[in-house]
Structure formats: C-alpha cells, structure tokens
Image (spheres, grey):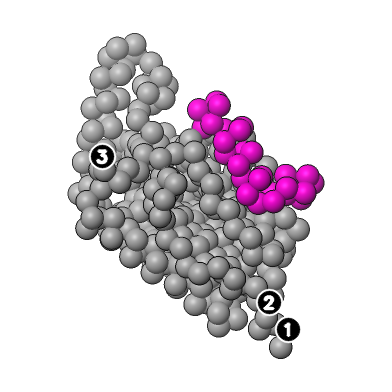
C-alpha cells in the first residue's frame, strides 16, 4: 500500500531561448504543445505503472528526439560543415552512476546510447567514432547522418554562416564572431527529470548542439554536473542554454549543492544560479529541477522555454512563454 502512495513526478524541457508568442503561428504553437504533452504523458505513464525514473526520462526524451521540432535527434542543428553531431547524458540519482556520449553522427537516439554507456561499460563518457564503435558492438543500428536533415535547420545554418562571415570580415576574429551570433544559434536542447515510486530521481539531456559549430565543439549537455545531474540526496537537473557558461559554472551540480548543503528549495536554488549567477555574466538558458519529494522548478532567464510537468499532486502543465502558459 505504501508504494502506491509514494509521490511520482516528471518535468521535461525542449530548450530555452528567444521564444516569442508574436512570432509563432497558432499552428506551430499547437505542434510544440502537442509534442511536449506527448513526451510528458509517455514519461508519466512509465511512472504510473511503477517504472523507474530512468525509464521515464528515456521514454520522454525519445519522443522529443524523434520530433523535428526540437534540437535533438531528428531536429538536430547543422555543424559549420553541414552535418549533425549529437550529444547526450543521463544520471541515476540512486547510485550517481552516469553515462554520456558526445559528437555521435549515426545514432538515432543518443540518450539510449548514453544509458548504455552507464549500464554496460566501465566509462562515463564516450565520444565520436569510439562511441559509435561501442554502440555497434552492443548491436545498436547505425543510421545515415542525413536522417537528421531538416529544411528549417539548414536555413538556420546558411543564415548563421552568413553572419559569421560578415563578423569575421569586420575584425578577423572567429571567437568574437561566434560570440556575436544571436542567442538562438547557440541554444537548443531537450531533457527530462523524474521521480519514481521507489523514491529515486534521474535526469537526462540530449542535443544537436550549436548551429554552425566547428572543430568538434561539445557543449554542456553531455557533461555531468554542467548539463545533467542527479542525486537522491538533493535533486535532479537537466539544463538548456549557452553551453559554455553552463560548463564554466557547473550549473546542474551547483543547483543541487545549494539544495544539499544550504537547505534551499529547488526553486530558490535554481533562481540563484540561473538569475543571480549566470544572467549578470551573459549566461542565458534555463533548467528543470526536481527533488525526491516531488517538488519541481522550471526556471529560465530567456523569453521562453518549452516545458511541461506533472506529478501525483499537480496536474499536467505545458508552457512555452515567459509569465504565461
């Protein structure tokens, strides 16, 4: 009887950024809301049936990876050279085991491979061809990189390259040119955090990275402690935003440390890091956070964040824009 009364909860995100209602058609908004609700229902359904938080996280993220609407899996952005390099990570709050993959190009659902690394290897992070060799050894089918192609993302690449070339002509500085790219080109991720009937929490994050990225750039999404973190003694976090800032400020782990050591609520801890630490130094993005009691925070310092949540004490909520549903 006790197990059935234990709280369950899940929160998901589909990325943060310059998301304005005035620039989104009703049809497109509905498509995003429907897909977020589908992912939420898929993950929550796992929890309702007594499934693990890890299973719920993967189930929800798979829905988002399989949709061209989000910068992960099917909707991944393009690198400067015109291909797709995908990253993902997952962490188990009960054991603090974790798995991650970076720069994979032929894996349809990177979050599944990240879990495989966690559960079936002695490692935490595998990258590129090595990660794909590991996947092949475990019987994971390889896909053509072109399965991730979408017209919208290709157009974004062309615009980003034009902007980069224009900026570089101005001062010959590639670093400065990248820094001056508009925020949307630097962001886009999906993620989930979940609490199961056994009281265990988990977090996962998956992304296509940054539009027009070069030189094998890797952001925060596959970095444990930066883009993903989970510990039953504090909280579970999945982040989305300008990854370089999230890496440098160890965002996901910092939020959980504030919960653990300072006794902050997930909402207070998330607000401190996202709005008081990151925002003043130009770090844009957001997080979803969940604690073992089922408390949820969905905090961001941008104009919007695709997000949804549901728990045994709170009904399903799907939201996109700031200060509104």
Residue 156: mark in rendering? 3
Question: Which secondary structure class fits the magenta region best?
Answer: helix
x 66%, y 83%: residue:
4
On the rendered structure, is 93 left or right of 170?
right
**Circle 1 SS class:** helix
Of residues 94 and 197, the one nearer the viewer is: 197
First of labels 2, 3 by sequence position:
2
Q: Which mark is residue 2?
A: 1
* Residue in the picture at 55% in, 26% down: 281
Q: CA distance from mark 2 to mark 1?
A: 6 Å
Density class for disc 2 (Cα within 10 Å; few <14, some 14-19, many ≥20) is some
* Residue 277: image location, x then y, percent: 61, 32
Relative depth, front residue between 288 and 63? 288
Q: Residues within 10 Å of mark 3 (few under 14, many from 20)?
A: some
Dots 2, 1 in contact, CB < 8 A: yes
- The residue closer to the viewer here, 62 or 45, is 45
Q: Is residue 104 visible?
A: no
Highlighted range, magenta: 256-283
Q: Secondary structure at mark 2?
A: loop
Q: Residue at x 57, y 36 (%)?
A: 275
Q: CA distance from mark 3 to mark 1?
A: 51 Å
**Which residue in the structure is indicated by mark 2?**
6
């Amino acid at each position: 009887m006790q197990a059935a009364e234990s709280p369950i909860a899940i929160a998901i995100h589909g990325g943060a950024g310059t998301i304005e209602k005035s620039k989104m058609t009703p049809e497109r908004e509905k498509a995003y809301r429907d897909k977020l609700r589908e992912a939420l229902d898929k993950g929550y359904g796992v929890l309702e049936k007594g499934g693990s938080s890890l299973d719920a996280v993967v189930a929800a993220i798979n829905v988002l990876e399989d949709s061209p609407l989000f910068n992960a899996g099917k909707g991944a952005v393009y690198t400067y050279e015109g291909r797709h390099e995908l990253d993902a990570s997952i962490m188990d709050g009960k054991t603090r085991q974790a798995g991650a993959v970076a720069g994979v190009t032929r894996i349809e659902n990177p979050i599944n491979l990240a879990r495989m690394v966690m559960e079936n290897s002695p490692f935490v992070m595998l990258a590129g061809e090595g990660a794909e060799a590991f996947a092949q050894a475990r019987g994971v089918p390889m896909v053509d990189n072109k399965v991730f192609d979408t017209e919208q993302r290709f157009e974004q690449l062309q615009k980003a390259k034009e902007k980069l070339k224009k900026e570089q002509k101005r001062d010959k500085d590639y670093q400065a040119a990248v820094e001056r790219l508009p925020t949307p080109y630097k962001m886009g991720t999906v993620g989930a955090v979940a609490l199961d009937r056994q009281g265990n929490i988990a977090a996962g994050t998956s992304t296509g990275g940054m539009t027009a990225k070069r030189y094998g750039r890797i952001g925060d999404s596959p970095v444990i402690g930066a883009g993903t973190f989970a510990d039953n003694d504090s909280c579970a976090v999945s982040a989305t935003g300008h990854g370089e800032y999230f890496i440098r400020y160890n965002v996901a782990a910092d939020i959980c440390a504030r919960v653990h050591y300072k006794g902050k609520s997930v909402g207070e801890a998330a607000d401190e890091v996202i709005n008081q630490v990151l925002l003043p130094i130009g770090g844009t993005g957001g997080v979803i956070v969940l604690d073992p009691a089922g408390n949820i925070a969905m905090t961001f310092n941008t104009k919007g964040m695709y997000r949804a949540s549901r728990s045994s004490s709170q009904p399903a909520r799907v939201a996109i824009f700031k200060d509104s549903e």
